[in-house]
Image: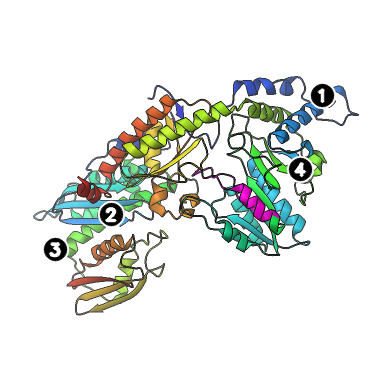
Amino acid sequence: MKFPYTDIVLEHFRHPRNVGKIENADGKATEGSPACGDMVSVYIKVDPKTNTIANAKFESYGCASNIATGSIITELAKGKTLDEAKAITWQQASDALGGLPKIKAHCSVLAVEGLRSAIQNYEERHGLIKEKVPTTVEVVSQRLRRVVNPLTGLNVVRTNLVQDIEVKDGVITVTIDLPGDHQFANTIKEEVMEKLETLWDVKQVIVKFTE
Amino acid sequence: MAERFIYLDNAAATRLDERVLEAMRPYFFDTYAVATSEFGYSQGIEAREQLDKARGFLAGALGAAPQEFIFTSGSTESSNIAVKGVALALLKKKGSHIIVSKIEDFPVLHSAQALERQGFRVTYLDVDSEGFVDLDRLRDSITRETILVSIQHASQEIGTIQDIEAIGRICREKGVLFHTDATHTFTRVPLDMKKIAVDLVTVSAHTIHGPKGIGGLCIRQGTQIAKWVDGGFQEFNLRAGLENIPGAVGFAKAVELVAPEETNRLQQMRDLLIDRMLAGIPHSILNGHRRKRLPQNANITFHYVEGESITLHLDMHGIAVSTGSACFSRSLEASHVILGIGGDHERAHGSIRFTFGRYNSLEDVDAAVKALAGIVEQLRKISPLGKEKEKEEA
């Protein structure tokens, strides 16, 4: 039989390592969105003494290269320091899998970004961010560019779904131009909260809907 | 790995029937001459007679006269000739407005888009959640400038069969030409041009166990259409190029071999597959209409999992299917048909199309259902989605 992937990719696809959630994870992140296509969640457990990744797990709603990359990236991350793990590139993950088709880069890069975001999430939650930039409307807007509008597959900022952003005394209020009972309202709300509530100077995130 | 190869992608291509090959063989090795006029040489005259015989048979299958049927290289070319040929012929005489549905197959959709870039105005009609064109909206969209309505007989992807009889009536009433792409309905769903007011019909051999590379376009007598594949005077001076006589003979043979009993058998497989999948695999939904659909087509979305992952696993089980997921397509775009029926990317992402053909059996359905149930369960364990819902239900 002729498959479009290397044997290592197929092996990780069929028997992915480190699948699942980590309860009480020290850091977690979700990249992509169910509505736009592939999506991957990464969870890490950190050993605070050595600043190394004690455990890493993932979940994938994606194609073969997404699943295989989630599997390999969690393998590569384990035992590495946070800085080392953050530096793992898509190319390294691809090489470890014996090569991924270039056209599949965007599906597989999500897992790499997922790991980085999970580490960032840990650092933010544990006050390890070195340069503390105050949160502004611009910072919020940048972060929301990583939330996908399920109706179009493009991000919520670009597709004008974000009607208003307000940052005041550590409280961020984001207004989404959708009815509150819309089928995607909850998904979007959760994603927005997740991207914003870890910002170091933010006390509360409020997501409002227009109707 | 797999013991048996189970092919469930018959909408894309079918296995050739040996009897078709046998019918074609003499026209590769014995009667290989060009079809000549009745004043040519004997082999050429024989070739011409076979071509005409095939033409007459195929035209008859659509309720048309032999001179209303031209051979092409397949349904892509047929639909191109229909849409662009009418556009060229009527641009100066009548207008530059064309109406197609949003879920047309690419030959019509992309021909319309190509014409739009040349300055034509195109209306892309919405369809409802089952894929049907709204007849009132169609009627309202027709203007004095409208030269052509092109709406597929049945969708190759979600299987929905349009009411082309009603569409034809509306077009006839309004004096607008009507083209339908019948690539997937030909011989499986009745289409009689004597009863239905359709002016141009695209058909192909590749979906019915005939050879690839041969199709046809039925053009009602008197339809204004311009020639744009220039060259010789073949095909009533509408489509130039050396006639594919083995192809034409094979096409006719393939049509002859389709029996109503076979179509009923495909429908049984379809119904069994749909019933068992929907009953046995949680969070699965049917795309398209339950009954008004191609007898050989089933299309199901399995929520919380992705289609390319499913097809790869199925391939490892020796089962070939297709998906509307962006990850599977060459363009990396999600199926415009599933998006067109109001589905979101998630619905396209986990959609799997099963299409049956002559060489499938009820055992294939059984194997597919069993394999799918396991694969979907396995992928859902990896997926971050749907867990809350399952907990709620438990």
Q: Which residues are magenta?
A: B150-172
Chain containing the residue with disc 4: B
How far separated are the C-alphas under marks 1 and 3?
Answer: 86 Å
Three-letter amino acid code of the residue under disc 1: Glu
Q: Is residue B170 on the magenta stretch?
A: yes
| Residue designated by label 2 | A114
How far separated are the C-alphas under marks 2 and 4?
Answer: 55 Å
| Residue designated by label 1 | B46
Three-letter amino acid code of the residue under disc 3: His
Chain containing the residue with disc 3: A
Q: Is residue B255 on the magenta stretch?
A: no
Front-most of residues A30 and B304: B304
Q: Which mark identifies residue B239?
A: 4
Q: Is residue B124 visible?
A: no
* SS type, badge 4: loop
Residue placed furthest toward the left: A49
How far separated are the C-alphas under marks 3 and 2?
Answer: 18 Å
| Residue designated by label 3 | A126
Three-letter amino acid code of the residue under disc 2: Gly
Q: In the visual, does B38 lie left or right of B283?
A: right
Q: Is residue B55 visible?
A: yes
Q: Position of residue B119 (x, y in %)?
A: 67, 64
Tell me the mark number nearer the camera, choosing from 2 and 4. Answer: 4
Work out whether disc 3 and disc 2 sit on a shared chain: yes
Neighbour tally class for label 4: few under 14, some 14-19, many 20 plus, Cα within 10 Å: many
Which of the marked residues, 3 or 2, is nearer the chain's N terminus? 2
Front-most of residues A140 and B84: B84
